[in-house]
Image: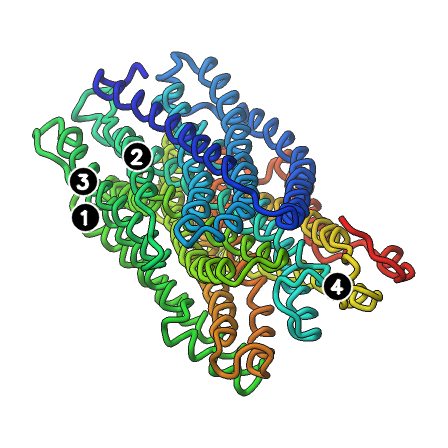
């Protein structure tokens, strides 16, 4: 950290200490959860089924993706030798040879670290959620607040681990690499994003295949309750809540947390480099790099305080109000902390005046999180008209229910994108006139957008706690029903489960919004990095990308835009089709087991393991192929169409990806809560024709809101990071060279294989599922 002042070095060491504190606090909470009562023998038996299934799934998933991680680690290390290191890396390490070596090692190690950190967040968070669900069910027998405390603290473990590991990785890389950190940080962000993609896709396919199959046969055909132990898919459904909503969501927000920090540091370095002429040759204004690191640390401390005040009592019984109180307390502490640090540190070295612009951009991020929170709640909560109207549409059948949900989702995506546009316009207004050089002003605006993402995800500790609260409460409710707990305990869990449905929908809105903001910030990093390489190889300023921009009137550039807009549709198609294929197998399996004598009478235990196995195999099949699509498409576009077309490709994928993600998430959330609104006794209640129609709508929405929509978040960022990594190579190596042509042929073959693999039918399980149905096996 030789480039830093004594005060800045102290601040960075403090940030490292806060990161370690956040991780330690997560494990303290974990110990408190494990000390709680696990309930009756029957509760623990059901819990054991869930725990075994979840651990088996994630272990198999890791074995599936480990080879790809190893290959990409080697490729990232080797790719650095293709192009010369950046000027900052040479200055930091003293020579071109040393810079080449250290950047190669750093990017590969950072990629591996980002991958393992992302997986650890998902794996540990899921395990604590599994440990917590049975303890929530047990605590519900004591009262409302004890159950709320266990559920929320279980989610807080995941939240604090997310912010702790994310901050630890970014800080360690900066401490070692200094002004050369962006090279290694790209690897860190790429690793986190790629694992998040796998966790989101795999977990989403698993959970929705089981959920759709269980609902269609159990609720609609057999007319039995949601978590009835006679349903063979019910354990797979409960396992899916953990591997999809806990592990998948944690990894998703972790990589958004990473990527916004990566883009802020990259753009902060470029912005600091712009004042070289003021400070002297070879010097940088590092305020713009240290500032986001310290903001993250303040957010960790605020999240700890906010989470500690989440509680209610037996009279109020308002879990949502308690969690909102914790969120707003943390937001207020962040506001005060950000303002204090800005006043002390963000002082212009030439004028001595305090620069409040980065602070204002960060506060805009906090406001964006609140706005998306309220917008998502409006379109997905049972308290507002959109969901009530969708429920009412169920009176005339499943078709009108589905039409109402589609319209709702499409409208909500428009309002969400307008909110994001407003946040970007805010950054433009804040940094308008930053410099007489338009390129520097553009960099400042994009840096402001990255700070908006920093502000939006400052309270990730609270956000993830609220999100994990949902599946933990859902699992607890399922365990309570299968274990036959008393009415008072069931009432507590029913209420917590209902609140959890809202928190899951709200946090999905924040996750999608943060993904788009992170992608826009990465887009700015792309323009800055390409221009930096063009400058190194002697391209005149008037011909650099940051000067000429991206001209979509050029045919090849417009083609890139069209391909970018199409990719989210391809991704959504493949993931939804995967859910449909797996759900069909689950439906057939549950129907088969219902015919076994004793199953419907409750005297024979269903073969839960069979449904778990079907969902697991279906989820694993898609991982490598979808990962290859995300990696190979930007490589092909970049080398075949050029760096400008690659930029327009990123613009297309950000736009259509955001619209598709919000549409699918909100439509699915609305269908889910429309069903629950009817189950509360409206429009005929359970087992009525409107209820059956709403169940059909919910099963249509399930793969949208929990598989296809959320998977677009990491996909957008993986593709942006791949583009950032390959852009210097695209600029420096002629596209017609034999080596490039050969590499593109290999990439095209790999992409064709990936698409073909995703469209293949899953291996038939006929040999086992059509065995003589005389007995049923337990797990």
Residue visible at 37% across and 56% down in the picture: 319
Q: Say which of marks 1 and 3 sits in front.
A: 3
Q: If you read the primary sequence from the N terminus, does the residue marked by circle 2 or circle 3 appear first?
A: 2
Q: If you read the primary sequence from the N terminus, does the residue marked by circle 1 or circle 3 appear first?
A: 3
Asked if 572 appears above or below 133 in the picture, the reply is below
Which residue is identified by label 2? 301
- Label 4, label 1: how far apart the Cα atoms are: 65 Å
Residue 228 appears in the picture as rendered = yes
Taking the image as shown, residue 279 lies to the left or right of residue 671, namely: left
Taking the image as shown, residue 31 lies to the left or right of residue 145, namely: right
Which residue is identified by label 4? 602
Q: Position of residue 634 (x, y in %)?
A: 54, 46
Specify the quadrant that holds the N terminus.
top left
Asked if 541 appears above or below 420 in the picture, the reply is above
Which residue is identified by label 3? 336
In the picture, the disc for residue 430 is: 1
Q: If you read the primary sequence from the N terminus, does the residue marked by circle 2 or circle 1 appear first?
A: 2
SS assignment at label 2: helix
């Amino acid at each position: 950290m030789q480039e830093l002042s004594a005060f800045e070095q102290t601040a960075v060491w403090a940030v490292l200490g806060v990161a370690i504190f956040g991780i330690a606090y997560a494990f303290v909470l974990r110990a408190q959860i494990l000390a709680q009562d696990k309930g009756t023998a029957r509760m623990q038996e059901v819990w054991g089924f869930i725990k075994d299934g979840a651990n088996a799934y994630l272990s198999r998933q890791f074995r599936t993706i480990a080879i790809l991680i190893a290959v990409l680690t080697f490729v990232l290390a080797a790719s650095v030798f293709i192009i010369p290191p950046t000027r900052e890396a040479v200055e930091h390490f003293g020579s071109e040879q040393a810079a080449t070596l250290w950047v190669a090692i750093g990017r590969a190690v950072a990629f591996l670290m980002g991958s393992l950190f992302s997986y650890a967040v998902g794996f540990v968070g899921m395990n604590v959620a599994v440990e917590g669900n049975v303890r929530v069910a047990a605590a519900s027998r004591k009262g409302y607040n004890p159950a709320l405390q266990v559920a929320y603290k279980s989610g807080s473990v995941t939240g604090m681990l997310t912010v702790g590991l994310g901050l630890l990785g970014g800080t360690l890389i900066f401490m070692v690499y200094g002004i050369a950190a962006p090279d290694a940080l790209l690897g860190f962000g790429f690793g986190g994003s790629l694992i998040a993609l796998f966790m989101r896709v795999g977990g989403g396919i698993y959970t929705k295949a089981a959920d759709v199959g269980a609902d269609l046969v159990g609720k609609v055909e057999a007319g039995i309750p949601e978590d009835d132990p006679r349903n063979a898919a019910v354990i797979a459904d409960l396992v899916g809540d953990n591997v999809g909503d806990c592990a998948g969501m944690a990894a998703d927000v972790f990589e958004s947390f990473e990527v916004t920090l990566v883009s802020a540091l990259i753009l902060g370095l470029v912005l600091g480099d712009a004042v070289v002429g003021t400070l002297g040759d070879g010097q940088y204004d590092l305020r713009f790099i240290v500032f986001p690191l310290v903001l993250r640390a303040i957010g960790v401390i605020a999240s700890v305080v906010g989470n500690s005040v989440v509680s209610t009592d037996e009279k109020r019984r308002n879990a949502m109000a308690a969690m909102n109180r914790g969120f707003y307390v943390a937001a207020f502490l962040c506001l005060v902390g950000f303002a204090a640090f800005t006043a002390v540190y963000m002082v212009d070295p030439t004028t001595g005046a305090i620069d409040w612009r980065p602070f204002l951009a960060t506060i805009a991020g906090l406001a964006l999180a609140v706005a998306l929170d309220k917008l998502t709640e409006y379109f997905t909560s049972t308290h507002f008209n959109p969901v009530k109207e969708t429920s009412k549409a169920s009176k005339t059948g499943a078709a009108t229910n589905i039409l109402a949900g589609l319209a709702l989702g499409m409208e909500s995506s428009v309002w969400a994108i307008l909110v994001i546009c407003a946040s970007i316009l805010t950054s433009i207004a804040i940094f308008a006139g930053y410099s007489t050089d338009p390129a520097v002003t553009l960099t400042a605006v994009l840096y402001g957008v990255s700070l908006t993402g920093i502000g939006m995800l400052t309270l990730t500790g609270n956000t993830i706690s609220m999100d994990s609260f949902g599946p933990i409460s859902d699992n607890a409710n399922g365990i309570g029903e299968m274990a036959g707990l008393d009415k008072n305990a069931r009432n507590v869990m029913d209420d917590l489960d209902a609140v959890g449905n809202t928190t899951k929908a709200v946090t999905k809105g924040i996750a999608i919004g943060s993904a788009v903001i992170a992608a826009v910030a990465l887009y700015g990093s792309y323009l800055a990095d390409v221009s930096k390489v063009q400058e190194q190889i002697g391209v005149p300023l008037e011909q650099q990308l940051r000067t000429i921009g991206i001209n979509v009137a050029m045919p090849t550039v417009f083609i890139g835009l069209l391909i970018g807009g199409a990719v989210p549709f391809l991704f959504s198609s493949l993931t939804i089709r995967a859910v449909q294929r797996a759900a069909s197998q689950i439906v057939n399996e549950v129907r088969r087991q219902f015919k076994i004598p004793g199953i419907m009478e409750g005297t024979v235990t269903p073969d839960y393991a069979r449904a778990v196995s079907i969902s697991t195999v279906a989820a694993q099949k898609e991982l490598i192929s979808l990962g290859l699509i995300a990696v190979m498409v930007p490589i092909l576009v970049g080398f075949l169409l050029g760096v400008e077309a690659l930029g327009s490709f990123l613009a297309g994928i950000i736009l259509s990806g955001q619209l598709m993600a919000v549409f699918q998430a909100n439509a699915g959330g609305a269908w889910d809560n429309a069903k629950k609104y009817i189950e509360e006794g409206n429009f005929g209640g359970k087992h009525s024709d409107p209820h059956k129609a709403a169940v059909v709508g919910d099963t249509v929405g399930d793969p949208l809101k929990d598989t296809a929509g959320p998977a677009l978040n990491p996909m957008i960022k993986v593709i942006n990071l791949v583009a950032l990594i390959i852009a210097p190579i695209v600029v420096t190596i002629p596209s017609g060279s034999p080596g490039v042509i050969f590499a593109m042929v290999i990439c095209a073959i790999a992409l064709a294989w990936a698409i073909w693999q995703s469209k293949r039918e899953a291996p038939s399980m006929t040999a086992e599922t059509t065995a003589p149905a005389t007995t049923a096996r337990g797990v």
